[in-house]
Image (tube, rainbow, N blue to C red):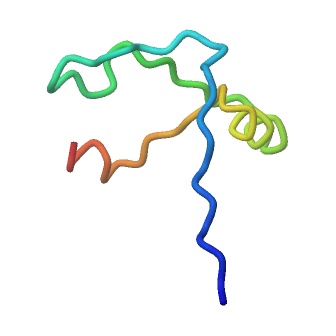
């Protein structure tokens, strides 16, 4: 018998992030970081201090 999948646990954010965004604001107010090495980018993503937005997310939001 298979066991149910464990749901991810959520933690308090240890960085500043908007609590809400104005509808239709797009990427206004978000900081663009383009000069990171791949390893640094992946490390920050694992830590939860860096995210990304794909173009289709902007179109469908």
Q: Which quadrant holds the N terminus?
A: bottom right
Quarter of the view holding residue 45: top right
Give above or below for 23 relative to 59.
above
Residue placed furthest toward the bottom? 1
How many callouts does the rendering have? Answer: 0
- In the rendering, at what x and y percent does residue 40 appear? 81, 35
Residue placed furthest toward the left? 24
- In the rendering, at what x and y percent does residue 37 appear? 80, 37
In the depicted view, which residue is nearer to us: 17 or 53? Answer: 17
- In the rendering, at what x and y percent does residue 61 appear? 22, 42
Residue placed furthest toward the right? 39
Residue displayed at 65% across by 76% down: 3
Give above or below for 44 relative to 58.
above
Residue 41 located left or right of residue 4: right
Residue 3 located left or right of residue 31: right
Quarter of the view holding residue 47: top right
Residue displayed at 76% across by 43% down: 42
Residue displayed at 78% across by 44% down: 38
In the depicted view, which residue is nearer to us: 23 or 13? Answer: 13
Residue 27 located left or right of residue 14: left
- In the rendering, at what x and y percent does residue 59 appear? 21, 47
Residue displayed at 41% across by 14% down: 18
């Amino acid at each position: 018998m298979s066991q149910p999948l464990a749901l991810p646990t959520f933690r308090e954010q240890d960085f500043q992030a908007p609590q809400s965004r104005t509808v239709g604001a797009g990427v206004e107010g978000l900081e663009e970081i383009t000069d990171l090495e791949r390893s640094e980018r992946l490390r920050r993503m694992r830590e939860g201090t860096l995210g990304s937005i794909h173009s289709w997310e902007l179109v469908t939001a």
